[in-house]
Amino acid sequence: MGQRLVINGIKNHAPIFNIYYHWSAYTETALHETDQLLKYLLRPENCGDLVLSAIEYCENNGGGITGDKDFEEAKRLYPDHNFKTDDISRNNGLIAITADGMNNNMSWAEETIDIDFDNDLINNNVFWGYDDVDQINEEYEYNEDEKLKDSDILVPHISVEQFHFDQIDEVYKIIADNHWFQGDCCILSKIE
């Protein structure tokens, strides 16, 4: 069983695609996948049709369309496109564009990231959450000299859970250099 990630693309306040990755629901890996996808989708030549561009991104990176209904819908929407049918790896992204396909991908998700194209926001949910340091110390069974204190928890200057597209590099640096963060509602820990 892999650590399964789904990245949801949202436009006009509704999902327009999602991509299932079998081994990517680790905090840094998930953010990297999101960053690479976003950089591709925001290129001027790609941002006109986010769905087709997301399909092409998956195909170019070893993934592809996830199921028969999604494949038929893609052919209906883009009859002139030659979609990839072979050598599609779930590790490299299985994209869904129908409600059924997206629901199926979500049913497998252990962690999710939402890319909100309406507001240029990323909602990053790839963390473990804890109520306080006492819960962490108990769960990890830290010895007295290992126990975390409130002062060990980084309070980042921007949210690592919800941030603008242009802040992704800054969030990645915060996450790469630390393990524990004060989140919007609880203490967060990287999934590694």
Image (tube, rainbow, N blue to C red):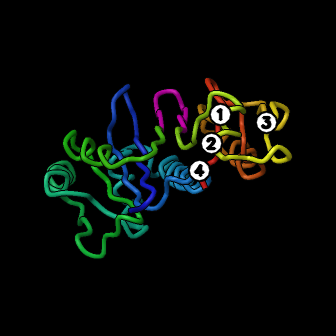
Badge 3 local density, few (<14 within 10 Å), some, or many (20+)? some
* Left or right: where 58 falls relative to 44: left
Q: Which residue is mark 1?
A: 135
Of label 4 and label 1, which has the lower sequence position?
A: 1
Of label 2 and label 3, which has the lower sequence position?
A: 2
Report the mark closest to the observer, 2 or 4.
Answer: 2
Asked if the residue at tag 1 contacts the one at tag 2, i.e. Cβ–Cβ closer than 8 Å, the answer is yes
The amino acid at mark 3 is: Leu
Q: Which residue is mark 3?
A: 154
Task: Report the Cα–Cα distance between label 2 and label 3.
Answer: 19 Å
Of label 4 and label 3, which has the lower sequence position?
A: 3
Q: Which residue is mark 4?
A: 191
Task: Report the Cα–Cα distance between label 2 and label 1.
Answer: 6 Å
User: Residue 7: where, in percent of width, then height?
Assistant: 43, 46
* Secondary element at image label 2: helix
* Residue at 24% from the left image edge and 46% from the top image edge: 104
Q: Which residue is mark 2?
A: 139
The amino acid at mark 4 is: Ile
Task: Report the Cα–Cα distance between label 1 and label 3.
Answer: 17 Å
* Secondary element at image label 1: helix
